Image (cartoon, grey):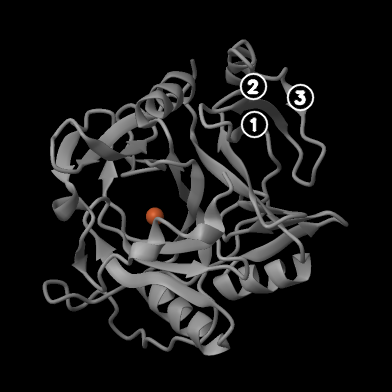
Amino acid sequence: MIKVADVAYGRLGAPDLDRMEEFLLDFGMVRADRTKTALYMRGTDSEHHLHVTEIGDPTHFGLAYFARSEDDLKTLSKADGASEVEEIDEPGGGKRVRLTDPDGRPIEVIHGMETLDPIEVRDVVINTGKERFNRTGDLQRLKMRPSHVKRSAHAVFRTTNLKATLEWYQGYLGLMETDTIYVGDKDNHLATFNHIDAGDEYVDHHVMLALQSDSAAFNHLSFEVADFDDVQIGHEYLEKTGKYKLAWGIGRHVMGSQIFDYWRDPWGRIHEHWTDSDMVNANHVPELYADYEGLVNQWGPDFPETFLDDPELHAL
Ligand SMILES: [Fe+2]
């Protein structure tokens, strides 16, 4: 029905907003606003926020995507089960349409959220073997500190019906299949990566990954950071706090090629830092990969079993 522009934020629940804020600050976000009942965190880009935590049970309340125009919201409001176009009564404002995906996951499509001045981040200039003089006279002196979360990048979840889920996201939100992973038989699809349809313009390899499973569940929210040093220093910083569990990393994926690092928040929910994604556009031709080709790394630690099937994470 429409083609969304990007993922906007994930909405989580947490019984202790102070503890959640402490984690997200350590993870490299900045507070945009906080009310009595919710916490809104931003990155260095200009979106008002890219992460919402509501006070309550440590569960997942769904995902929000950016519409390209208010007209697109009007179009989407005519979808089966969609809300009217409504004002967002929260910091950052804007308008939204609420929908429910085939698993029952709440989806918001929003437009007109307030923008803020971007937060300055140092320029990333790196000397390589081929280009040795990119950083002449500029000494690299990095500080041990949290990473710089730049923007919302993607969300990953488990679904009980991969086919219906893909039809829904592709049909209503205009996502396009990037690549699919199968197990054994080529018709036995385990997971499909989807990208934004921005025509000829290049976008991240995936904005959404859905995994076929026997239960629907949230898996992770993902955020782009400034550069590779940010991934590595952010990792060391989180490790040195001694407060959080590493979920997987640091490594370089095959699917999307990102250099990644995954951490669990105080209630076990996975948050990802990455840099250097593959970029595709609407001309990309989807490919099929076996699980042993696609779910491995180009380098880094092996895929941990607990990553996909964590009993703590059975909320949507
Ligand atoms: Fe990811």
Mark 2 to mark 3 CA distance (whole Å): 11 Å
User: Disc 3 residue type?
Assistant: Glu
Q: Splitting the image into 4 quarters, where does residue 126 fall?
A: bottom left
Residue drawn at the location 36% of the way across and 37% of the way down: 195
Residue drawn at the location 16% of the way across and 38% of the way down: 288
Q: Nearer the viewer, mark 2 or mark 3?
A: 3
Earlier residue among tags 3 and 1 = 3
Q: Residues within 10 Å of mark 3 (few under 14, many from 20)?
A: some
Residue at image mark 3 = 86
Residue drawn at the location 14% of the way across and 53% of the way down: 293
User: Disc 1 residue type?
Assistant: His
Earlier residue among tags 1 and 2 = 2
Residue at image mark 1 = 111
Position in image of residue 91 (x %, y %): 79, 47
Between 264 and 276, the one lying in front of the other is 264
Q: Is residue 244 left or right of residue 162?
A: right
| Residue lying farthest to the right in this orientation | 36
Confirm whether residue 179 shows in the render: no
Q: Are marks 1 and 2 in contact (CB under 8 Å)?
A: yes
